[in-house]
Image (spheres, helix red, strand yellow):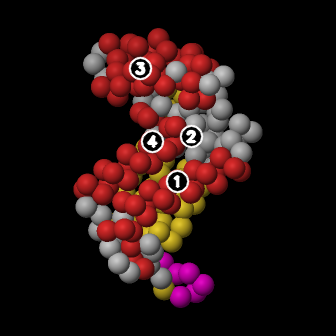
């Protein structure tokens, strides 16, 4: 459901991409009730893209998150999510190099996601994940029975985290 676009001017190794994608997925899925299968992370090389800040050419690393917003997600939630994602970048990327080119210039959360379909299911409104899981559980089970590894993992995750009970197993 959310899509994180990690835009870099420095090359990230495959292991750095894997670690950052895992960290972002873990952070988002545990902050909210989004199953891991529906957290999307992509990497974009912008080293040749011309970008200007304050009217001057500038290159920097950025992460843009397109997410669902609603009354169940507060400013404090977004601030905490931001701190965690920035900390993950600092640990996985910035600590491995020196110089400003390894810094994360911005982490921007955009809440423009109004709806859509993903993996064959409608995207629920923010805060509607538990009801959405209940409404679509039979479809999830069918995809898992058909051998879709992502849905097999998701059913285990829903059980392990108690997601059907509410936010990360809490009512």
Left or right of 131: which side holds 86? left
Q: Position of residue 13 (x, y in %)?
A: 25, 61
Measure how far apart labels 1 and 3 are at the Cα level: 26 Å
Q: Earlier in the sequence, mark 3 or mark 4?
A: 4
Give the label, 2 or 3, closer to the camera. 2
Disc 2 marks which residue? 31
User: Can residue 44 be seen by looking at this rendering?
Assistant: no
Q: Position of residue 101 (x, y in %)?
A: 39, 77
Q: Element under label 1?
A: helix
Disc 4 marks which residue? 26
Query: Magenta segment range?
Result: 50-56
Instruction: From this view, report whether residue 142 is shown above or below residue 71.
Output: above
Q: Residue at x 36, y 18 (%)?
A: 143
Give the label, 3 or 4, closer to the camera. 4
Disc 1 marks which residue? 84
Residue 155: mark: 3
């Amino acid at each position: 459901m959310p899509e994180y676009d990690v835009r870099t001017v420095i090359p990230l190794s495959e292991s750095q991409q894997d670690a950052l994608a895992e960290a972002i997925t873990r952070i988002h899925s545990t902050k909210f009730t989004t199953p891991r299968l529906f957290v999307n992370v992509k990497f974009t090389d912008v080293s040749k893209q011309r970008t200007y800040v304050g009217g001057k050419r500038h290159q920097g690393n950025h992460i843009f998150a397109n997410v669902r917003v609603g009354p169940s997600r507060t400013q404090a939630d977004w601030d905490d999510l931001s701190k965690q994602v920035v900390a993950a970048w600092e640990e996985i990327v910035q600590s491995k190099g020196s110089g400003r080119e390894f810094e994360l210039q911005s982490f921007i959360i955009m809440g423009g996601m109004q709806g859509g379909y993903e993996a064959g299911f409608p995207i629920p409104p923010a805060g509607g994940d538990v009801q959405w899981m209940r409404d679509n559980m039979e479809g999830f089970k069918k995809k898992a029975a058909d051998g879709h590894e992502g849905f097999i993992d998701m059913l285990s995750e829903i059980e392990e985290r108690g997601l059907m009970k509410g936010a990360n197993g809490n009512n």
